[in-house]
Amino acid sequence: MSLVRDRLIQDLALAGYARSTQRVYAWAIHDFVRFVRRSPSELGQDDVRRWVRELIQSRISPQRLRHHFAALRFLFTKTMHRPEVVSFLSWPAAPDRLPVVLGLEEIDRLLAALPHAIYRAFFTTIYATGLRLSEACRLETHDIDAARGVVHVRHGKGGKERMVMLRPRLLAALREHWRAERPPSPWLFASRWGGPLNPNTARKALRRAAASAGLTKRVTPHVLRHSFATHLLEQGTDLRVIQVLLGHSSIATTTRYVRVSAALIAATTSPHDLLPG
């Protein structure tokens, strides 16, 4: 299994998959091999079908089920060159849930509840720019272009680069952060060991701050990104501008924020209001 695992991770890296995705796929294949008790090179479609039935009966979430399916498909299609083994797989439908969005007062309470200055600066940056957690963790000091008023996102999803806004208030906060922390080059937000800020450590800090702030919603770094997009929309920002700022390939992904904007919904005239009398 170790040889197959090494080849799988190598192929995932060559295909440009993030390290976190590589780990998820590797663990999914580890679970699969532990279930069938044989090397993937000896397995056929019946073995995969047995594992799929086991996964479905275990009632794991649709997201985790898609992770397992994606790992199986990559393993047999790319690494093993046996696509016929997984040709029957179909993706389970994902529940179409609305994104969680915080109000301005909730954002303010959340940021104030972060006990360490580095996390206040870090999550302020995520909310002020709409960055993904992984993008913010890997920001470098030279990505901050004060002269042009932009942040250069070099480590975007799928290796795509983009620009996001750098407003004076955020620039002042980042300068204060740099003076106080003096992070080791090249990172803007660094861990105590000198590398980029650990995303899991950041998540835990945010979760504790949400509890301290008395927020009942489940708060994650992505909730700040959702809130950024929704608040921009409520200010009247064009949807295509929001698409570019978020780094979405398709406008269809961005339109989900139209569905969660309470301000826009509340301001929409109902046909009932047009009735005479």
Image: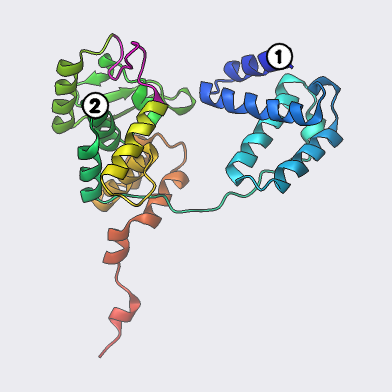
In which image quadrant can residue 275 be found?
A: bottom left
| Residue at the image position 58 percent from the left and 49 percent from the top | 94
The amino acid beneath tag 2 is Val
* Mark in front: 1 vs 2: 1
Residue 221 x %, y %: 36, 37
| Residue at the image position 16 percent from the left and 27 percent from the top | 173
* Colour pattern: rainbow
| Residue at the image position 65 percent from the left and 47 percent from the top | 92
Residue 187 appearing in the image: yes
10 Å crowding of disc 2: few (<14), some (14-19), many (20+): some
Task: State which tag comes first along the sequence, 1 or 2.
Answer: 1
Nearer to us in this view, 22 or 149: 22
Figure quadrant of the C terminus: bottom left
Residue 172 x %, y %: 13, 26
| Residue at the image position 27 percent from the left and 25 percent from the top | 151
Residue 234 x %, y %: 26, 53
Figure quadrant of the N terminus: top right
In which image quadrant can residue 210 be found?
A: top left
Residue 272 x %, y %: 33, 80
Q: Which mark is residue 150?
A: 2
10 Å crowding of disc 1: few (<14), some (14-19), many (20+): few
Label 1, secondary structure: give it.
helix
Q: To which residue does mark 1 refer?
A: 2
Stretch of the chain drawn in magenta = 185-199
